[in-house]
Amino acid sequence: VEKRELLYEGKTKQVFATDNQNFRIFAFKDEATAFNGLKKGKISGKGVINNKISSILMRVLEREGVPTHFVKEISDREQIVKAVSIMPIEVLVRNVAAGTLSKRLGLPEGAKLSSTVYEYCYKNNDLGDPLINTSHVVALGLATEEELKLMLKIAGKINDVLSACLKKINVDLIDFKLEFGKTIDGTIIVADEITPDTCRFWDSVTRSKLDIDRFRKDLGGVEEAYNEIFNRLQSL
Ligand code: TMP
């Protein structure tokens, strides 16, 4: 597969075309953003680490039968992925109260949820990715009810697989965000990335944050946290 033109420049990644219409190349950047792009910065080495972390986690999912876009790492910052059209919905999965859930519902950060919470956001930067429900998804034609059901089922499986995998390295999966894409033949698969940019990871023992919240909240030790997750994953 040969790299061709830049198709899309995102906040944290570039997407390139290749000489094969079924494949694209992701290049992970060191740029970090928070609060819908209001806060910007750089986390030195993040692109390299996130490329590795997402590759490891996508491989874990594939091994457990979850269809993903991941194909192959090709350099420090780059990976080949399957070409998809991204569904305009983010699926959020939450095991413990944190972030916007805590804020919206007045739950203390770290409060255990007695069952998993699933949320949808409409992917629209101008609107700040608003929270929507099933009837919005269907009424706006963002996905069919069947597609949404499938995405939810995959999200639940991912939560089970990743929570168990991370538990082995003393990391609690607090919450995470998923994106889905449709391949050329119409199959729905997991797309984008699964990294400390898109998940909340807490040390199981100390409850210390090992993710982008360190950047959002100016807690320091951001690079160290990303490296810590990568090092622990490598020991698996
Ligand atoms: P939140 O508490 O800010 O709504 O985020 C919930 C989880 O989803 C958290 O792990 C961060 C992740 N997330 C993203 O990666 N990108 C997003 O645009 C949003 C809204 C959440």
Image (cartoon, rainbow, N blue to C red):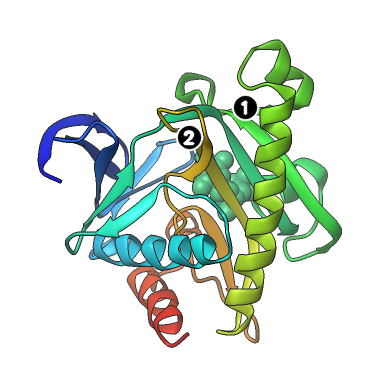
Q: Nearer the viewer, residue 183 or 130?
A: 183
Q: Residue at x 42, y 44 (%)?
A: 192
Name the image quarter holding residue 11. Answer: top left
Of marks 2 and 1, which one's residue comes earlier in the chain? Answer: 1
Q: Is residue 49 left or right of residue 189?
A: left
Q: Nearer the viewer, residue 167 or 109?
A: 167
Q: Residue at x 75, y 41 (%)?
A: 104
Residue 51, position as x, y percentages in the image: 31, 60
Residue 124, position as x, y percentages in the image: 50, 23
> In this rendering, is residue 49 above or below 119?
below
Identify the residue position indicated by label 2 in the image. 181
Front label number (2 vs 1):
2
Identify the residue position indicated by label 1 in the image. 130
State the SS at label 1.
loop
For badge 1, the amino acid type reads Pro
Give the class, few, some or many, for how many residues have Cα within 10 Å of label 1's Cα (few <14, many ≥20).
some
